[in-house]
């Protein structure tokens, strides 16, 4: 008869700990914020003044009204790209300021 194993890999233990402690969500948010510059590109990212996540919304403060308007047209595409970069849905909306 084969016995069930209670063994987990170190990676599984760390993932379980992060999930149970609530840190997994914070790490996902950090990944999204890090990906912002990559998705936007370095030439446009320089117009970003502040980036943070609150209530599943990515808040972006820009110092260019032209860029703000342009990004408002592409919000759903940007949300999709950012969530795909992390591998799960972390944000549901983008607030451009």
Image (tube, helix red, strand yellow):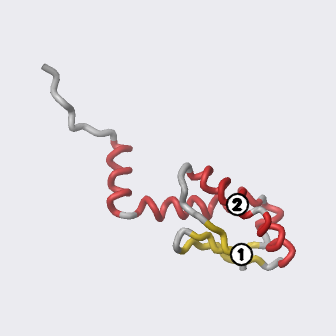
Disc ID at residue 40: none
Residue 40 image offset from top left, x and y in percent: 76, 60
Location of the C terminus (image quadrant): bottom right
Which image quadrant for residue 46? bottom right
Q: Earlier in the sequence, mark 2 or mark 1?
A: 2
The crowd level at tag 2 (other Cα within 10 Å; few <14, some 14-19, many 20+) is: few
Residue 60 image offset from top left, x and y in percent: 68, 74
Residue drawn at x 32%, y 59% as measured from the top left: 20
Residue drawn at x 68%, y 62% as measured from the top left: 36
Disc ID at residue 76: 2
Residue drawn at x 77%, y 69% as measured from the top left: 72
The residue positioned farthest toward the top in the image shown: 1
Q: Name the residue under label 1.
A: 96
The crowd level at tag 1 (other Cα within 10 Å; few <14, some 14-19, many 20+) is: some
Please tell me which residue lies in front, 10 or 28.
Answer: 28
Q: Is mark 2 on a helix, strand or loop?
A: helix
In this picture, is 13 found above or below 70?
above
Please tell me which residue lies in front, 86 or 42.
Answer: 86
Q: What element carries label 1?
A: strand
Separation of residues labelled 2 and 1 (CA atoms) = 13 Å
Residue 24 image offset from top left, x and y in percent: 43, 59
Location of the N terminus (image quadrant): top left
């Amino acid at each position: 008869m084969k016995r069930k194993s209670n063994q987990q890999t170190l990676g599984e233990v760390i993932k379980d700990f992060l999930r149970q402690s609530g840190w997994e969500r914070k790490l996902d948010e950090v990944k999204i914020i890090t990906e912002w510059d990559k998705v936007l590109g370095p030439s446009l990212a320089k117009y970003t003044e502040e980036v943070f996540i609150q209530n599943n919304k990515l808040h972006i403060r820009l110092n260019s009204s032209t860029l703000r308007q342009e990004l408002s047209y592409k919000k759903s595409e940007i949300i999709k790209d950012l969530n795909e970069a992390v591998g799960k849905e972390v944000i549901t909306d983008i607030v451009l300021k």
